Each structure stands twice: as C-alpha cells, then as structure tokens.
Amino acid sequence: MSKLPLIDAKCRVEQAQAVLGTWLEVTVDTDRDVTLIGAVMSLLDGVPEAINEAETELSNYVMRDHLEGKS
C-alpha cells in the first residue's frame, strides 16, 4: 500500500462525498439503497475537517521543532 499525503486523502474523501451525494439524488430504486448511501455519507462526515486539523497539528509540530533548532 502506498503512502497517501493528507491533502490527497482529504481530496479523495471529498470526491467520494460528491459521488455519493450525486448517487443519492438519482437513486429511486429502494429505501434500502438510500439508507446504505446515507450510512456511508455519515461515516465520511467530518473526515475532511479532521484531516485539515491533523495537517495543521503536524505542520505546527514540525515548525516548532525547526524553530527550536532540532531539525
């Protein structure tokens, strides 16, 4: 498995959310399909924000070490 930068992971989650949203809009088959799509969407809810927060924390950590002369 290759390493995926956080920004790319965030973009992929946002793309998945967009695809699921579109799929949900055009789904007319069954309530089951709507429920399953909604369930996956709810699992992804907040993930891009968490990735942003993690990226910020990591950047702050690296910058702090750099400013303290540890790198």
Image (tube, rainbow, N blue to C red):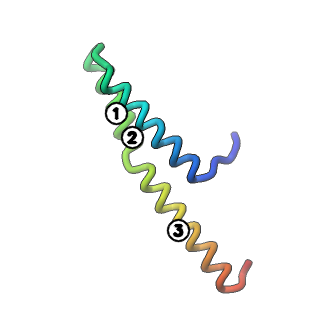
Task: State the residue at coordinates (62%, 76%).
Answer: 63
Q: Which residue is mark 2?
A: 43
The answer to which image quadrant residue 27 occupies is top left
Q: Which residue is mark 1?
A: 39
Position of 45 compared to 71: left or right?
Answer: left
In depth, the one of 61 and 25 nearer the eye is: 25
Position of 9 compared to 37: left or right?
Answer: right
Q: Is residue 37 positioned above or below 60 on the image?
A: above
Quadrant containing the C terminus in the rendered view: bottom right
Task: State the residue at coordinates (52%, 45%).
Answer: 11
Task: State the residue at coordinates (43%, 31%).
Answer: 19
Mark 3 crowdedness (10 Å alpha carbons): few <14, some 14-19, many ≥20: few
x then y, percent, for residue 28: 28, 16
| Residue 57, disc | 3
| Residue 8, disc | none
Kind of residue at badge 3: Glu
Q: Is residue 23 positioned above or below 9 on the image?
A: above
Q: Secondary structure at mark 3?
A: helix
In the image, farthest residue toward the right? 71
x then y, percent, for residue 68: 66, 86
Kind of residue at badge 2: Leu
User: Which callout, 3 or 2, points at the residue further toward the start of the chain?
Assistant: 2
Q: Secondary structure at mark 2?
A: helix
The answer to which image quadrant residue 32 occupies is top left
In depth, the one of 38 and 27 nearer the eye is: 27
Kind of residue at badge 1: Ala
x then y, percent, for residue 17: 41, 37
